[in-house]
Image (cartoon, helix red, strand yellow):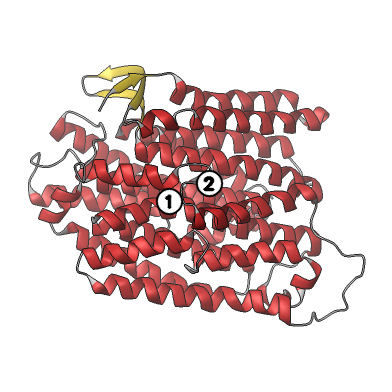
Amino acid sequence: MEVIVSIRPFLAVLVTLIGALLIIFTGERHRDLRESWTILVSVLKFGIVISMVPFVLNGWTLEYTIISLTPGVSLQFRVDQLGLFFGVLASALWIATSVYSIGYVRGLNEHAQTRYFFNFALALSATMGIAFAGNLLTLFIFYEILTLSTYPLVAHKETEDAIMGGRKYLAYILTAGVAILFAIIFIYAITGTLDFKPGGFLSGHASSATLIFLFVTLILGFGVKAAIMPLHEWLPTAMIAPTPVSALLHAVAVVKAGVFGCLRIILYVFGPDLLDSLDLWILSAYFASFTVIVSGMYALTQDNLKRRLAFSTINNLAIIIMGASLLTPSAITGSIFHMAGHGFMKITLFFVAGAIYVKTHKENVSELDGLGRQMPLTMGAFAIGAMGIAGTPPVCGFISKWYLALGSLEAKEIVFLFVLLISALLDVAYFFPIIYNSFFKGPEEAIDPHFDEAPMKMLAPLVITAIISLVLGIFPNAFFNFFNIASMATGKILGGM
């Protein structure tokens, strides 16, 4: 595998940091210019990230070291298949989220818009740092920056509930960060390195008991941000945030960063061989399966639409971790690909929730009867996203869940196939009545003949993400080469299979 020194991953992090500063300096006096910076840097970031795809598809790795701290420890970016996959996903979704955010904050005349866009840009810089981190230390630094930059977004409304939600978010995530830092120091002490390696690097460096302790510590640490039960409570509480922030939390950055961290630990720190020899893979898979089923049941009980979507997110994040834990080629490929599929599908669903709120100020599932007749494009996009989450063809969720099901059979663990099937039935149970009632039930109040869709800056992004979710289900390599990158990552992890 050829390593190329390239400044591109550093530029991908830097461009939105510069954009954040431009947003602050522009301020409220020049709102159009401020929001132009948001769109410009999001497009530039995506261009930089996508320019790295040909290198990675050719089997090369891009590296850029900012500073070497001690032997074996540096602040370093390294673009491998998994990192590029996450980087492409986050940078693509940020363009849609940026456009949508402009329509949302203007539609509701939100306060502190400059602070909002500043922290949004800062969060995406941190996300790129996480995606392209070459080692555990770099990952940890940007992981914590992401936490601090998203706190003002969670607490944006500055109400009592918003402040409480923000504090709970910080308490959970920062406590988990302490556990992660402890494990990182421990790993460096026993190995002398923190660099990620496909297939892991910890084997033979400590006793079985010590390795089990480190694995549990790291999975629980990253699992907090991934909202693994019972460490999930911060996420539904954080739904007090504005809807674009919820989309950022669920589809673009925060919880995906937690899942990404779990995948790094499972596949690049411990690795399949070590996890198999310690029987940790089966424990991890069962632990994630518990969250898959219970979160789906919780979703059924939620009338608030965003909370229902939050528990659906918890369900799908656990599916990704469960799939990676099975350690089979199909399961790992399906797990990685589901990060992208879920990203586009779930951001569509949150965009719809925000569009409904801006247009009608309705937040509950029980209030949506007949809304499909008034907002057919919006609720049509919701139908596509919901069908995909349930694994219905031809939306992209079907492909990832098909591979996860094959992976369960490859692992000769049929119980996880049943977990996937039960999860899909729960998805149908809590999403499909919304679709049916919105299109085939009459509204409680008379339809306003002048009622139309949400503003175009909100409608266009949700329609585009819904279309991409559909296209990726038919052509999984369309636009971004997601499936090829996921397959290459799996091959590297499993030793060229």
* Residue 384 seen from this side: yes
> Please, which residue is most extreme toward the front here?
475
As shown in the figure, which amino acid type bears the numbered disc 2?
Val
Q: Is residue 175 visible?
A: no
Towards the viewer: 158 or 317: 317
Secondary structure at badge 2 equals helix
In the rendered view of the protein, which quadrant contains the N terminus? top left
Name the quadrant containing residue 413: bottom left
Q: Which mark is residue 252?
A: 2
Label 2 neighbour load within 10 Å: few <14, some 14-19, many 20+: many
Image location (x, y in percent) of residue 194: 24, 32
Q: Give the Cα separation between the discs numbered 1 and 2.
A: 13 Å
Q: Label 1 belongs to which residue?
A: 225
Where is residue 301? Give x, y as percent.
Answer: 54, 78
**x and y percent of residue 191 in the render?**
15, 33
Q: In the image, what residue occupies the spot 32% across and 61% down?
A: 322
